[in-house]
Image (cartoon, helix red, strand yellow):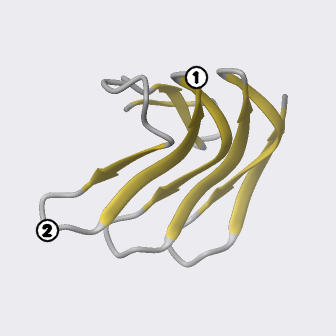
Amino acid sequence: EKIAKSQNDAIAVEDIVLDDLDAKTKEEFYEDGVLKTEVSLKNGKMHGTYRSYFPNGELKIKGKYKNGEKSGTWKFYNVEGKVMDKVSY
């Protein structure tokens, strides 16, 4: 996963590398085993809910993909769980 900070310091997802085109979900973990990202897949493309988590397990980003493209409203949270930004696609 590549990340970039926008002008208001919200973290945005740029890219996720998909290794298995038959997979239904893609999950990545921190070194200590805590879930880092999860995304649903359809035909090898991101399709459905995307979630990214802080190392403490708190939700960092929640959004949806439709046929590999960001869709709908994405929410960006701080480590305390407060919504810091919303972006519509």
Closer to the camera: disc 1 or disc 2?
1
Q: Mark 2 sits on what residue?
A: 32
Q: Position of residue 36 (x, y in %)?
A: 36, 56
The secondary structure type at the circle numbered 2 is loop
Quadrant where the image shows the C terminus: top right
Is residue 85 rendered to the left or right of residue 46? right
Does residue 63 lie above or below 66 as drawn? below
Residue most extreme to the front: 22
Q: Residue at x 47, y 51 (%)?
A: 38
* Circle 2 crowding by C-alpha within 10 Å: few under 14, some 14–19, many from 20: few
Residue most extreme to the left: 31
Quadrant where the image shows the N terminus: top left
Q: Mark 1 sits on what residue?
A: 43
Q: Position of residue 85 (x, y in %)?
A: 74, 51
Foreground pick, 42 / 76: 42
CA gap between label 1 and label 2 equals 30 Å
The kind of residue on which mark 1 rests is Asn
* Circle 1 crowding by C-alpha within 10 Å: few under 14, some 14–19, many from 20: few
Residue 82 placement: quadrant = bottom right
The kind of residue on which mark 2 rests is Asp
Does residue 44 lie above or below 63 as drawn? above
Residue 29 placement: quadrant = bottom left
Q: Residue at x 43, y 29 (%)?
A: 22
Q: Which label sits on residue 77?
A: none
The secondary structure type at the circle numbered 1 is loop
Q: Position of residue 69 (x, y in %)?
A: 71, 21
Does residue 40 lie above or below 59 as drawn? above
Q: Position of residue 87 (x, y in %)?
A: 80, 39
Q: Residue at x 48, y 74 (%)?
A: 58
Mark 1 or 2, nearer chain start: 2
